[in-house]
Image (cartoon, coloured by chain):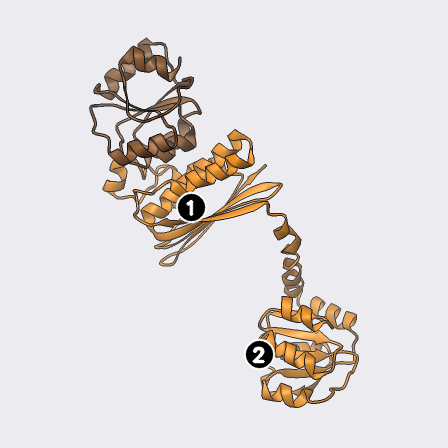
Chain colours: A brown, B orange
Amino acid sequence: MTTKELIENLNLKPLSKFDHREIKGVFVSDMLSDVMAGAKSGDIWVTVQTHKSVIPAANLVDVSAVIITSNKQVPQDTIELASKHSIALLWTELPTFEFVGKLYALGLMTT
Amino acid sequence: MKIKNIKDILDAEVIVGDDKLDIDVKHIYASDLMSDVLAFGEPNSILLTGLASQQAIISAHMAEFDGVVLIRGKKTKDGSEKFARDKQIVLLSTQLDMYDACVRIGLADNKQIILNSEKLAFPVKNNIILSHEFSVDGNDFTNAGMASTEVKAVLKKIGLDPVLIRRVAISTYESEMNVVMHAKRGTVKLSVTPKFIQVIIEDVGKGIPDIKMAMQEGYTTATEEMRAMGFGSGMGLPNIKKNSDELDLSSEVGKGTCLRLKFFI
């Protein structure tokens, strides 16, 4: 599945500028070190964290997208930094639990 | 090693500086080329030389040496003695030739031999393909992760293996976050050689009282505020260890921490 298909399927709101890419799996965490340690290249990262340091972490781990759940307000500087590094920053009003349920239904798994 | 020891080892005669034999010298530099002395000599050294003219004493003085040993029983020429006295340089004379003098000092103080071989780091230095330095400010969460992002970009430009780059990037990010969370300020130094990538993260800050504890998964001293941002789950150092090939952590409480990481290419 690609980020384009995911956005269409789950009605996600893209916040940043980026190129679409293949999604390999899913990683859910709000602890950055967990992401650094556990997320794989190509995973989408599902989180409620919205501060700017999320973007370097996403870039360094090479996730295919960051999905901000739970109707969170995302700071402008986070969005700008994401665009600068072509990180897909996607948004949903759904809480993490419900959103992850939908991902599961789409057949996405932890890699 | 004290000058007195050197005098005894070399069975040398004191020409100038009888009262300064208790000075502790750090290095021995043996050369007859004064431009080499000026280029490579380090402060607190003793010069072993066959050049008995005033130029030897002047060079020793310029290079901030503590003394000069004349070899093969050479006698001082022109104003050497007076200059040595004026500039407080100890002046000795030995009957030994350069080789024997060096060997005797080396055998008497093995440490000295190691010190000299460290200087062979010169050719290694030339092997560095590239080096970069980035500064990191403590408590600056807005720019946290920027140095690591730069490091990744630099390595990507060289065209290194993405898996290796990812390991370096993750380790650097965790280290950088440690500086942001716990220190006043720090630097991230990246150097790349044909065989390995080295990242040195050095900070000025409170230091780590118990390194063994800090290396344990889950151990954290982060504040609630940091944890609310998703940092400080006590996984930083274990993550770094997992991703690097060599890790050397040293710290002094109240001064700061230095983390040296190596990744073999």
Of the pair B204 and B52, the residue shown nearer to us: B52
- Amino acid type assigned to the residue bearing label 2 in the image: Ile
Q: Earlier in the sequence, mark 1 or mark 2?
A: 2
| 10 Å crowding of disc 2: few (<14), some (14-19), many (20+) | some
* Vertical comparison of A10 with B164: above or below: above
Label 1 and label 2: CA atoms lie apart by: 39 Å
Circle 2 SS class = loop
Residue at figure coordinates x 59%, y 36% from the top left: B265
Q: Is residue B66 above or below residue B168?
A: below
Identify which residue is drawn at 51% across, 37% down: B155
Does residue B248 appear in the picture of this structure?
Answer: no
Residue receiving disc 1? B212
At a point 35% along the width and 37% down the height, the residue shown is B218
Q: Nearer the viewer, residue B133 or B91?
A: B133
Q: Disc 2: which chain?
A: B
Q: x%, y% of residue B59?
A: 65, 77
Using the image, determine if residue A57 lies above or below residue A102.
Answer: below
Residue B27 in the image: state x and y as whole percent: 62, 69
SS state under label 1: helix
Residue B161 in sight in this render: yes
Q: Amino acid at mark 1?
A: Lys
On the rendered structure, is B218 left or right of B56? left
Return the residue at label 2.
Answer: B23
Q: Nearer the viewer, mark 1 or mark 2?
A: 2
